[in-house]
Image: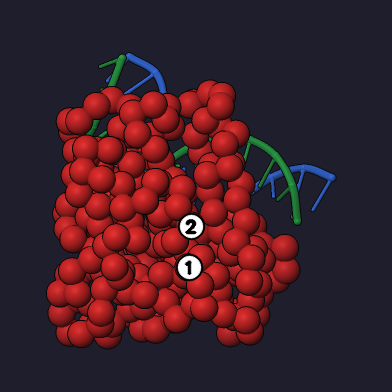
Chain colours: A red, B green, C blue
Amino acid sequence: VDRAIDRTLLHDDVLAAARALIGVRLIRAAGDMPRRVGRIVEVEAYDGPDDLASHARFGRHGRSAPMFGPPGRAYVYRVYGMYTCLNVVVGPPGSPSAVLIRAVEPLGGIEAIRTARIQHDLRRRRSTRPPAADLTAVAAVRDRIGRLADARLAAGPGLVAAAFSVDVDFTGIDLCDPASPLRLAPGDDPAPGRIPAGQGSMSVIATPRIGIAYAGEPWVSVPWRFLVEDSPAASGPRRRRLPTR
DNA sequence: CTCTAGATTATCT
DNA sequence: GATAATCTAGAGC
């Protein structure tokens, strides 16, 4: 069993906690499936009720209730009717801040991750298509996922949840408990928020957050998205084409 | 390569 | 009743 991260890492203000989560390992243990492990390479910070991009702006009720709880728990919700997003609750209890895990670089259990991605896509397809087993379409999904480079398997918030089989049932679980089916473990980085040399760039950059245009200024512009510069596993289009294994 | 439409449903006003 | 912390396919260049 792995050691979990030190929860006090998450006691800081939300920006410090978000930065500190870069490089941390996300671990998924599911029954008899091989253990899935990845390195967090991209996050976004959502601050208390004043942040008009945050789900906490509606107050302490409904899906966002875990945000108001103690740090280190998961806040998981469904978005756009079909995707799931994983957050780490941070800050002292009562301060409803959280960090969205936007992208993870797969390190272990990669075939299990691929399988989970395929299952997720097929499940999504099943709800919209007739129940007939459309073997051509199923083969197309398997083929598309099978060709993806490892680094693209969890390169977006909805893809992280799909790759690590995170469902909304997981909201509220303790990610700092080494016995949790989904947990956080320390990376072997030389310093918080830093990536070892040879594993890509050392630097962590900050940009505005994605997909929150509704929040207006200043929230659309504050640089509260943190990512490993040039990481091939970060979300969005890549500059360079990746080998497709 | 970039751009855009459309899928889908819990949660919000 | 409207919208959303997204993603993919397909069209156009």
State the residue position of label 1.
Answer: A192
Q: Say if A201 sits above or below A12 in the image.
A: below
Percent x, y of residue A135:
37, 70
Q: Say if B13 sits above or below A165 in the image.
A: above
Within 10 Å of the Cα at label 1, are there few (<14), some (14-19), or many (20+) other Cα atoms? some
Q: Please, what is the three-letter code of the amino acid marked with disc 1?
A: Pro
State left or right for residue A121 relative to residue A202: left
Within 10 Å of the Cα at label 2, are there few (<14), some (14-19), or many (20+) other Cα atoms? many
The image's mark for residue A73 is none
Q: Please, what is the three-letter code of the amino acid marked with disc 2?
A: Arg
Percent x, y of residue A161:
34, 60
State left or right for residue A133 relative to residue A68: right
Percent x, y of residue A149:
56, 76
State the residue position of label 2.
Answer: A19
* Marked residue nearer the N-terminal end (1 or 2): 2
Res A118 visible? no
Dot 1 and dot 2 residues touching (CB under 8 Å): yes
